[in-house]
Image: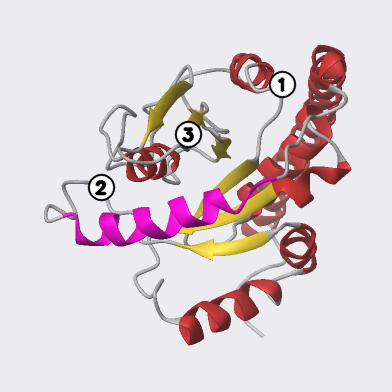
Amino acid sequence: MTEERTILLVGRTGNGRSTIANVISNTSKFKESDYGISESEGGQIGHFRLKGEEMIYHIVDTIGIGNNRFTEKETLKRLTNAVIGVQNGLNQIFFVISGKFTREDVEAFTLLRMIFFGEDIGKYTTIVQTKFPYFQDPEKRRKNKEIMMNQNEDVGTILRSCRRLIHVNNLTEKEDFRLRARNDCRAFLRNYICNCKDIYKPSNLGEMNERIENYLAERNKGNDKQWQINQLMNENSQLRQQLNQFTGQQRQFNPFNTGFF
């Protein structure tokens, strides 16, 4: 009997989603970048079956959150198209981070939970930390997870809510020209995916467009308030400068200020 596994790759721009997709599929179909910019602008989907196996893999790479080539609204629309493509069910969401779990990563995960999925997203989400050279060392992995759990409350909450944190050293082909790290990571990731048997069908996809509009409206309100605050701060700074200049002039031309005691 043929089994299938559908994996959705999400995360911030430049964290290594496309490299992960190529590692799993053992292809170069997904565009990789050596820099902190997104190459997968519209999302990419790959389907493959391993020789001699019955498992069919569906790998869905999405546009990077925080993509600097598109507006936030356009990025959300492209993410929507990718998520709709897996509305019949997926086995696991790979939320890809690179190095530390940053504040931007927390915001990206929160965005996915609020708009695209729901509070139950963690049950079907694996945090994938890329470029971890000690990914085969259990003690190094344990220590790294402990550090991340204690990093701050937001990161700890996300990690506790998710299925698992896994580590890989998914170097690009240019960085790993002998493909040793990629081969080791491929074996691990494929084995991990095979054990992700439960199917997740987000129940609120029909409300995505409305939630996106509400989110953007709130963001605009916040931006307007921040703009007003910045304006007041700038005006206040200018007034202080003018006051300091005036005070200095008064001291300079004070006829009683002779410079003698």
Q: What residue is drawn where x is 78% and y is 42%?
A: 236
Mark 2, secondary structure of its residue:
loop
Q: Nearer the viewer, residue 171 or 12?
A: 171
Image x and y of residue 119, in percent: 87, 43
Q: Is residue 42 left or right of residue 255?
A: left
Q: Is residue 98 left or right of residue 179?
A: right
Quadrant of image for the C terminus: bottom right
Observer able to see residue 249 = no
**Residue type at numbered disc 3:** Tyr
Q: CA distance from mark 1 to mark 3?
A: 15 Å
Image x and y of residue 18, in percent: 39, 36
The region drawn magenta spans: 179-197
Q: What residue is drawn where x is 87% and y is 19%?
A: 214
Q: Which residue is the site of mark 1?
A: 88
Q: Which residue is the site of mark 2?
A: 172
Mark closer to the chain start, 2 or 3: 3
Image x and y of residue 232, in percent: 81, 36
Q: Which-is-in-front pick, marks 2 and 3?
A: 3
Cβ atoms at labels 2 and 3 below 8 Å apart: no
Q: Residues within 10 Å of mark 1 (few under 14, many from 20)?
A: few
Q: How many marks?
A: 3
Assign the magenta stretch its main secondary structure.
helix
Q: Which residue is the site of mark 3?
A: 57
Mark 1, secondary structure of its residue:
loop
Cβ atoms at labels 1 and 3 below 8 Å apart: no
Mark 3, secondary structure of its residue:
strand
Q: Quadrant of residue 181?
A: bottom left
Instruction: Name above or below for residue 171 compared with residue 51.
Output: below
Image x and y of residue 22, in percent: 33, 38
